[in-house]
């Protein structure tokens, strides 16, 4: 892929509940917007200084899209609220005390030196468990100064760390408040209704859906019955034509469709294509034809026989003839879908969001179209698009290549007040030893304890591939961004992941000066 060279750039989550997702939380920094960066060594040409105002920016975005913020336990204390007054909807057990979870950054903390960071990391990046290709980028978030660079510009298989790029590009292309519609219109024949999938992967059948706050088919069916009056529908047409191309991604392992973490990507599906909405991500059986399964569920709600459900397209006729809208429901805003995707590494949501980038840029809503649109969005943001090649939005594809330095640049860009629409990427970042995909990490493995509560990052794992990218607060309170990717690890994750975590933990443990 092509794009401008890097030097030309112009520019906590709550706990998961059963069948649900963590409430949206703010990003890790709460620095005042008026404060300037502390003096630091001259920034290399390939980095532009971007001040950090993550919390203020994200709160502005949330207010602008009308999202209600749930700030349990540590998040409430971190923002200066009374933790005891936080929402506890659904009887969720209160979270740990704020002091036990998140390390607060200090913009006036001393800047680590490249020599200090090198001394801390050199012994760790060569760990045998990580293999012979470990590419690393570490930079200061406030100044942008590069503090460690080992193969930082080299494209590396990122696995699910790809979702950081998906998040930033969809927020840039669609905006954090965009909602994905699922519509029903009158069909061309008497008694025929057409349900049009817009690409909402969180759509539920009823109130027992997997994703909290999702749009529901039973409510859509109620709208249709009201619109039809006494007329009883006799057939359901499923229109998923907004998507095109294969339903499985290029470069996916053979076991992805049935392994529990991925499935067929269609424009209409319910509960991320789960056959049982109560099953968590990673172990869920998925419908082989999610669009038809959703259409049949909708037919049952309307009292239409399931054998009267088939694929087709909505008529082009104008109101009040065929094509008249009978009902519509909307997904949660994209900022929440991004939160879900990142916090639980939800591959089905990721692929849906990549297609939203494609649709926003008038590309085909397919794997190829999503990849082309994400590439173009990266370039428009002033990031080095020549350091990224993607084939999907989830990171399941082994064809994906992203450089560590692009990831650290991207994280800093999302922290910039110049791009408040990108701040939603931080809300779902898992916290080391506490939430999401980092819940069980930074706990017991030797040399990783310092990362608990100090590391917020997105992880990625495929066989022989291990990656992590995010933020870490040093012992002095300095906020750094880091990315570590290895795609030739010889061992299993039980040995590779702790070796990976020791690198970010070393940054958390030291002042590195």
Image (cartoon, rainbow, N blue to C red):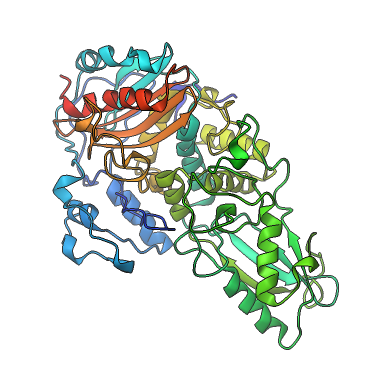
275 or 338: nearer the eye? 275
Relative vertical location of residue 322 with respect to residue 294 in this rendering, above or below: below
In the rendered view of the protein, which quadrant contains the N terminus? top right
Left or right of 367: which side holds 73? left
**Quarter holding residue 496:** top left
Residue 11 in sight here: no
81 or 350: nearer the eye? 350
- Residue found 16% across the figure and 52% down from its top: 97
**How far from the left and from the top, in percent, is residue 205?**
58, 66
**How far from the left and from the top, in percent, is residue 266?**
66, 50
Relative vertical location of residue 196 with respect to residue 40 in this rendering, above or below: below
172 or 85: nearer the eye? 85
- Residue found 66% across the figure and 68% down from its top: 298
Relative vertical location of residue 455 with respect to residue 55 in this rendering, above or below: above
Residue 395 in sight here: yes
**Quarter holding residue 426:** top left
In the rendered view of the protein, which quadrant contains the C terminus? top left
**How far from the left and from the top, in percent, is residue 236?**
76, 68
- Residue found 20% across the figure and 45% down from its top: 101
């Amino acid at each position: 892929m092509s794009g401008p060279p890097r030097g030309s750039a112009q520019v906590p989550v709550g706990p998961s509940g059963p069948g649900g997702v963590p409430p949206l939380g703010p990003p890790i920094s709460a620095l005042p917007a008026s404060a300037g960066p502390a003096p630091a060594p001259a920034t290399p040409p390939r980095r532009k200084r971007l001040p950090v105002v993550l919390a203020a920016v994200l709160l502005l975005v949330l207010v602008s899209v009308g999202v209600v913020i749930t700030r349990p336990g540590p998040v409430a204390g971190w923002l200066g609220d009374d933790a005891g007054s936080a929402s506890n909807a659904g009887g969720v057990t209160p979270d740990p005390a704020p002091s036990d979870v998140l390390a607060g950054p200090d913009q006036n903390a001393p800047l680590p030196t490249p020599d200090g960071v090198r001394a801390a990391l050199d012994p760790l990046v060569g760990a045998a468990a990580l293999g012979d290709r470990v590419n690393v980028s570490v930079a200061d978030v406030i100044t942008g100064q590069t503090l460690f660079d080992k193969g930082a510009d080299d494209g590396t298989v990122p696995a699910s760390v790809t979702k950081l790029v998906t998040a930033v590009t969809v927020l840039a292309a669609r905006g954090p408040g965009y909602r994905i519609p699922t519509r029903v219109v009158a069909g061309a024949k008497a008694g025929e209704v057409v349900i049009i999938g817009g690409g909402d992967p969180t759509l539920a059948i009823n109130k027992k859906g997997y994703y909290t706050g999702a749009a529901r088919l039973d409510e859509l069916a109620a709208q249709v019955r009201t619109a039809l009056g006494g007329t009883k529908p006799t057939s359901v047409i499923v229109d998923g034509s907004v998507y095109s191309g294969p339903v499985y991604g290029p470069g996916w392992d053979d076991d992805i469709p049935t392994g529990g973490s991925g499935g067929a990507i269609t424009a209409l599906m319910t509960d991320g294509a789960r056959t049982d909405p109560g099953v968590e991500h990673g172990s869920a059986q998925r419908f082989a034809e999610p669009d038809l399964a959703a259409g049949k569920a909708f037919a049952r709600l309307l009292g239409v026989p399931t054998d009267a459900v088939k694929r087709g397209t909505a008529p082009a006729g104008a109101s009040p003839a065929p094509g008249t809208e009978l009902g519509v429901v909307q997904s949660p805003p994209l900022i929440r879908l991004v939160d879900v995707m990142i916090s639980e590494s939800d591959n089905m949501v990721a692929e849906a969001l990549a297609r939203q980038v494609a649709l926003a840029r008038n590309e085909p809503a397919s794997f190829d179209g999503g990849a082309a649109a994400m590439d173009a969005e990266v370039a428009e943001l002033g990031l080095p698009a020549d350091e990224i090649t993607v084939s999907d939005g989830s990171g399941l594809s082994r064809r994906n290549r992203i450089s560590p330095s692009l990831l650290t640049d991207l994280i800093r860009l999302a922290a910039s007040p110049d791009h408040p629409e990108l701040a939603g990427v931080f809300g779902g970042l898992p916290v080391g030893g506490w939430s999401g995909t980092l819940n069980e990490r930074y706990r017991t493995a030797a040399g990783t304890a310092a990362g608990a509560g100090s590391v917020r990052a997105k992880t990625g794992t495929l066989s022989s591939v291990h990656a992590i990218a995010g933020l870490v607060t040093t012992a002095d309170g300095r906020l750094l961004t880091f990315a570590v990717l290895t795609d030739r690890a010889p061992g299993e994750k039980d040995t590779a992941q702790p070796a990976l975590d020791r690198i970010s933990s070393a940054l958390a443990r030291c002042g590195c000066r």
